Structure formats: C-alpha cells, structure tokens
Amino acid sequence: MFCGDGLRQKDEETFLLEIPENRDYKILQLTDLHLGFGIFSHKKDKMALDAVTKIINRTSPDLIVFTGDTIFPFLPKVGTMNNKKQAERFIRFIDRFRIPYTLVFGNHDCEMGAKCGREQLADVFTKGKYCIFSKGRKDIFGVGNFFINLTDKQENVLMPLVMLDSNMYGDGWFFSGFDCIHDDQTEWCMNRLSKLKKINPDIKAMAFFHMPVREFKEAYEKMKLGDKSVIYEHGSIAEKDEYFGISYKKGDFFKKAVENGIIKWMFCGHDHLNTLSLTYKGIRLTYGMSIDCLGYNGISKSYIQRGGTLITRKIDGRVDIKMIPLTRTVSTRVRGESKNQQH
C-alpha cells in the first residue's frame, strides 16, 4: 500500500490525498491491459507493457487509475489461470514508475476457475508499494468500493474520486450476461456524496468503474438521431455493430447520479474498441482508450483505439479530458460515418 506524503487512510472506505495547489493535477486512466504472463502470451504482454510505458512517460501523471481487466487468467489464450502470479508481476512492473495508482476490478480479472477470487486478489494488489486500494465495506455488494478524496493541505475535499466495482456476470458466469453497479452500492455512493455537498455545495466528483452504464448507449443513439442535448466530445464507437457491453439489468446508478448532481464525470473501459466521450444530462461519459493486445482475436494488429486517457484538474477546478493515442491516428466514427483525425 502506498504510504507516501500527502496520503492518509481515513477509514475502510476513504482515502485523503493531498494534491498540489500551485499546478494542475494529472490523472491517467488506463484500461483493459489484459496481461496474461503465461506461456502463450509473452509477445503480446510485451506489446502491452511497452504501450503502458510509453503512455506513462509521455504524460507524467500524478495518479494512475486502472479501470478493470488489468490481468487475464484465461487458459486457452494465456496458458495459466494463476491470477495471483499475474497480479504480482503487474505490481512489480507498475511499481517501478514510482507513481501512486489505484484500480477497480473488471469482469476478467477473476475468471471462473482462476486461483484467486476478488477478495484474495484484492489482498495481492494492496501489497503494491504505490497502490491505493481498499476492499471497502463488507455490507455492500462488490469488492473495491471506496473514495479517494483529493484535498488541500487542510484536508478540505476538492474533488472526490469514486471507485466502484461494476461486478462481473449476472446470475452465473459468462453466458448469463454482464452485471452492473448494484442498488446498495449506488445508495452508499450517493449518501457519501450528499454529506460532502453539505460541507461544500459546489463540489464535483468523478466516478471510475469497468463496465459502461446503460445510458451511454442511450445517449449515443439519441446523438445519432440528432438530439442536440447530447454533446459529442471525442472518440468513436468501433465495436462491431456499434456494440456496447452493457448489463441486461436496469441499474439506477446513472439516474441517481443525475438526481444527486455531484458526479460530473464517469470513466469506464470494457469495450476495447470504443473510445467515445459524450456529455449527457450534465454528466460526461468517457470510454478510456484500451491497451489490450490479447483479449480480442486479432486486436494486436489494431491500433486506433490503443492508448490512455489524460484527465487534468486545473488549478481553478476545471477539468480537461484528452485522449493519448499510442499512434497518431484516432478514429472519429460517429453517426454512421467513418473518418480519421490526425493528432
């Protein structure tokens, strides 16, 4: 666990992280690394680790957030289901950068039959020298529901970062469909945010989780129909048939966040070829650029979606979100059209 200056764990669900007051604060979102560290994945693991290294060196972030599927204990593609060793190798790699990092679980970090479940895997990740992570409260669903509150020197909360477990699959494993953020997680989150709002009525928060909320697809479809209330920010939908890996369950997290009014940014991963960012009902929904060289068949030869997402909190509190592509070409396929934008 990270024990550097400026970090204090207040309780099992809250960290206080002091940030500089005289400069911008940079958060790098990386998602879906799908690291195998098995006998079948050496070449593609190296590609992924090289990509992570380039992006971190290019952005010099203050904090790194991994939004799920960091490791991939899938025997046919990797050659191992020992996610404990995978996590330990990942930690050794990322600790070398000496940058604080945090993470949420995806649906693949603990595949069926893998050595560790999420509780055990959480114990492994918390051993990272620069890792900020908590299992969170045991009385709500999921593992890894916690807050990292960015503060000033007096521990006044400037911006809460909400880390949420979007869980794995529904009533069984893979073929039962994707799960979502559960109602008790949502209630816990909104109650905590409301308490912070009583102290600071102008407070704004970010939420990080793995699988997109259903409203992301809803917003995209409205935008394609010309609804001007949906604001296109950047990126594209490049999954086949404009696919969104959303839950079959309704899930009220987005709806309750709109009502609560404090979360203004949501970041997810999961759909490796999607990089879209939209603003809908006052909340900016952003797919992080993925790293995956292994999970999808043939994805190692793809490149327009690979990279990171740089989130910069300005000194005055404004937030800038920018794609950091590994290459110079970024797809901007929206509204059924396809074109390339040079950066």
Image (cartoon, rainbow, N blue to C red):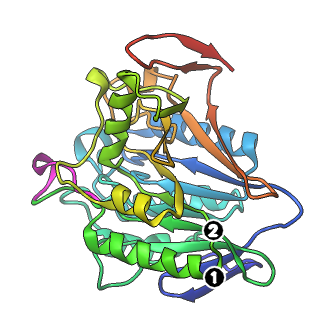
Tell whether 293 sits left or right of 308. Answer: left
Chain part drawn in magenta: 172-180
| Local crowd size for mark 2, using a 10 Å CA cut-off: few (<14), some (14–19), many (≥20) | many
- Quarter of the figure with residue 257: bottom left
Instruction: For mark 1, give the secondary structure.
Output: helix
Instruction: For mark 2, give the secondary structure.
Output: loop
Q: Are marks 1 and 2 in contact (CB under 8 Å)?
A: yes
At horizontal 18% and vertical 54% (from top left) the residue drawn is 249
Tell whether 64 sits left or right of 337. Answer: right
| 174 drawn magenta | yes
The residue identified by callout 2 is 203
Residue 312 seen anywhere in this rendered image of the structure? yes
> Which of 225 and 298 lies nearest the eye of the viewer?
225
- Quarter of the figure with residue 68: bottom left
> Which of 261 and 110 lies nearest the eye of the viewer?
261
Amino acid bearing label 1: Ile
Q: CA distance from mark 1 to mark 2?
A: 9 Å
At horizontal 30% and vertical 79% (from top left) the residue drawn is 140
The residue identified by callout 1 is 199
